[in-house]
Image (spheres, coloured by chain):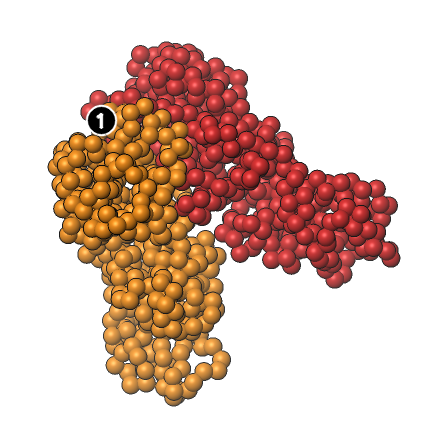
Chain colours: A red, B orange
Amino acid sequence: MHPVHVGVIGLGNVGSGTLDLLSENAAQIQEKLGFPLQVTALCSRTVQSKSLPFPNARRTADWREVVSAKDVDVVAELVGGTTVAAEIVNAAIEAGKSVVTANKELMALQGPDLWEKAIARGVNLAMEASVAGGIPIHNVLREGIAGDRIAALYGILNGTSNYILTEMEKHGADFADVLTEAQRLGYAEADPSADIDGFDARSKLAIVAALAFGEKITPADIYTEGIRRISPFDFHYAHKLAHTIRLICVARLTEDGLLLSVRPALIPQSTILASVQGAYNAIWVQGRYGADTFYYGRGAGPHPTGVAVVSDLMRVARELRGGSPERVSPFAHARLGIYKPISITRQRRAWYLRFRVSDRPGIIAALAQVLADKKVSLDAVLQLPGGDKDNLPFVITLEPTAEEDVREAVAKMSALDFLREPPLALPMETSL
Amino acid sequence: MHPVHVGVIGLGNVGSGTLDLLSENAAQIQEKLGFPLQVTALCSRTVQSKSLPFPNARRTADWREVVSAKDVDVVAELVGGTTVAAEIVNAAIEAGKSVVTANKELMALQGPDLWEKAIARGVNLAMEASVAGGIPIHNVLREGIAGDRIAALYGILNGTSNYILTEMEKHGADFADVLTEAQRLGYAEADPSADIDGFDARSKLAIVAALAFGEKITPADIYTEGIRRISPFDFHYAHKLAHTIRLICVARLTEDGLLLSVRPALIPQSTILASVQGAYNAIWVQGRYGADTFYYGRGAGPHPTGVAVVSDLMRVARELRGGSPERVSPFAHARLGIYKPISITRQRRAWYLRFRVSDRPGIIAALAQVLADKKVSLDAVLQLPGGDKDNLPFVITLEPTAEEDVREAVAKMSALDFLREPPLALPMETSL
């Protein structure tokens, strides 16, 4: 029952959550594995001043000491960011250590390369904690439903924006007010851009889509749009259409290739994805054989993310103990050339166009004319009663239309003088 | 790239679904594993007359030939039942083969013993397909969230009874009519008892609870009650209380031990579990650290179950190739003595009592007196307008009360002459 030795680098939120689990669950972990996990090294800039479990572990502010230590078998990289973290992961792999990381940005940008290095060096690289904290989606895609072929994947992968949208929906509140409140409560950062402009979700989608489709996918492959323009009346209109609005990450296989996007979209209220409230994350997977499966849980937090880190440590330790399995990069298992990312512009689907106008006669006629010129079929015109005549919201929905045609129509409409702002165009994900 | 060799015994629904995946996904499976899975033996009574993929595989009606074949590394036992299946699994383990099984009854009854044999013989035993077909719940509990400690688990694990309940709910239809329709459509068996009386769900809960809590749990440990007494007006009253009714499998850790039950219960309509419609399965897990996670998918079907079998075959093959990992029985990882099954009778919670009476003055007074005698606090009395005076349904809800007190009150009430049938008592799972 020799232990497997763990070095933890980075003792912020995720690091301390991980240490809580490793110390409080040590007995269970040993029972499950058949041998203990022993923490032999702890590293952070302020490690000397922290109150930490594992009194016998070496404490150092120099990560190089952990990476090169003889009594460390697995390194947990929990510092975040992409500069020092990249150095740590590279150095650990070179030193022949397996690595567990919670770093979504690093894995989204450099995951395929790091995996190739790990395979060449014969070590393991695990990254469950990098996406959707408490949901074991990596494990599900790499092992649980590995026998299936994924057709599509829809995710709510940013807790902050889901919190903001569902608060707006519940209370009819404005985006700016909910954001301020979220910042006050610590749910949103002082600079909220990564969350509300979709960049955080984009990194996560890059990783999950790579796992699902076995292709190298980089964040730049993914069309990304944030939630700043969503307003409470968009929820009113969406509800009228039996839909709601969420920031949806999509990776869907089409005949032409892989369609990737992060954007606010209308989804049917009857779908289980629509029931995801607050700071939760969720992933809906459509498999060619297993059909629909759905996974839901906390997207972040020291303990949910700590569960992912510790579960990865257990798996890596089990493999270390078992010998040397064949390693295959999760980013490149499908070299069959059918999963290439494609442009979203030819994708045909239903659309929600929302306008804010200074009311006067002839508005619908003018807008309908633009659509007719582009040979786009209008499905419905919706206008809720009441409202300010100088700033009147209403909605036109479109029959399935290619995105490029919608964009051209929206550009043309934007020049019309009665519009208070450019039309907001949201896809309707009716295929969910 | 030597292949790992697979022998498949049992070519019914699950067996043919498994072969579809193994043949149609062969290229992907090889890319993911780094080596191919090769089917070398196929066994069923009618194997000679079937049209099957893998023309080079040996075909036999004698499972002993597969189990003893030199060119079989892993045996997939897909025959079902507990007699021949037990012989096959035992013989395969004795012959040093790893086993993948889809057999819930066998694993619920003999899983712990079979696992001990497998460990002693140094082989693997995988059973993802035995519970909740397309949902990789075994993988999640054993690996994905292995670092967590489970506090409670709530499941909808029988698709047939969930189909019947949600059809009753949607259409206000009677149990008997929906059952007949389900039988006509092939969703329910000619003898529906295993599904509607909770026995199928009980086997599954025994397995999942064992995985979650690491204890040997047998079906006999689980209080089980079916859905035959649920009627459309129970859904009306449940909705009035902002709840719905589902056949819920519960495994919850209390201070006294592990509480296990399969029974129809009221659950809040706002919970994600309440949104599970039709023949789907779902599992809600509450972890001490990871908090809530939720898993949802098809409960059965050749292809969803085939995904589970093939994913297990891949995992077992990967481990075979990697050497000999430490094996720990998933049924006995927590020998800490805190997870013993306990009787449900002392459990306090809110209750829904539904009566059908021949209306006359003094009924509420008589029922309230029985409750008062038992020192049980009544929470609300609900009676929807209209209804047949000779067969009038109404509902009393109770403040949290121990089950034994509810049972005694119900027994006493059953003797009252105005009741058309004994009261129906359903727990309210408000802690969800």
Residue in the picture at 50% in, 29% down: A337
Q: Chain of mark 1?
A: B
Residue in the picture at 35% in, 17% down: A122
Q: Amino acid at mark 1?
A: Ser
Residue in the picture at 50% in, 42% down: A152
Under tag 1, what secondary structure? loop
The percent coordinates of residue B61 (x first, y second) are 18, 47
Of A24 and B16, nearer the camera is B16
The percent coordinates of residue A334 (x first, y second) are 45, 30
Residue in the picture at 33% in, 71% down: B229
Which residue is the site of mark 1? B324
The percent coordinates of residue A112 (x first, y second) are 48, 23
Image quadrant holding the N terminus of chain A, namely: top left
- Asked if residue B369 lies left or right of residue A408, the reply is left
Of A198 and B113, nearer the camera is B113
- Asked if residue A250 lies left or right of residue B244, the reply is right
Of B29 and A133, nearer the camera is B29
Residue A17, compared with residue A373, is above or below; it is above
Q: How many marks?
A: 1
The residue carrying pointer 1 sits among few (fewer than 14), some (14 to 19) or many (20 or more) residues within 10 Å by Cα, namely: some
| Residue A422 visible somewhere in the drawing | no
Residue A273, compared with residue B398, is above or below; it is above
Of A206 and A54, nearer the camera is A206
The percent coordinates of residue B256 (x first, y second) are 24, 51
Dividing the picture into quadrants, the one containing residue A185 is: top right
| Residue A258 visible somewhere in the drawing | yes
